[in-house]
Amino acid sequence: MEIVIKKLSKSELDNLGVGKWPIWEKEKGSFNWHYAKQETCYFLEGKAEIEISGSAKVKIQKGDLVVFPANLSCLWHIQDKVKKHYKFEK
């Protein structure tokens, strides 16, 4: 399973409606997470490293649009407080 990271222009973000998505925030720390559904998110602030078992770590930071696939289990390591817009697929 692969995490996709993209850099999009403001107009591309506007076309996706990112500014209307809910916001999630989390302080520095680590936790396990499982994605039952695909999540697309846009990092407004912060830095994190996502660890997938048997795979390399993925670094995410402010300005990244990230797609986490459904059925992904991973370990989040938040290095700087994260603030992101997010949307789960239906």
Image (tube, rainbow, N blue to C red):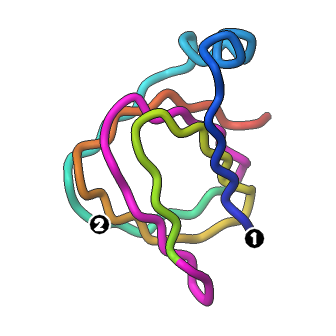
Mark 2 Cα shell of 10 Å, populated few (<14), some (14-19), many (≥20): some
Q: Quadrant of the C terminus?
A: top right
Residue hosting label 1: 1
* Quadrant housing residue 70: bottom right
Q: Give the answer, above or below, for where 69 lies relative to 86.
A: below
Magenta-drawn segment: 37-56
The relative height of residue 11 versus residue 23 in the rendered view (above or below) is above
Residue 66, by quadrant, is top right
**Residue at the (31%, 42%) spot, across then down:** 46
Residue 61 in the image: x percent, y percent?
41, 46
Determine contact: label 1, label 2, CB under 8 Å. Answer: no
Q: Which residue has dot 2 on it? A: 30
Q: Residue furthest right?
A: 90
Left or right, 33 with respect to 62, comes to right
* CA distance for labels 1 and 2: 21 Å
Image quarter hosting the N terminus: bottom right
Q: Is residue 18 magenta?
A: no
Q: How many numbered markers are drawn?
A: 2
In the image, is residue 45 above or below residue 30? above
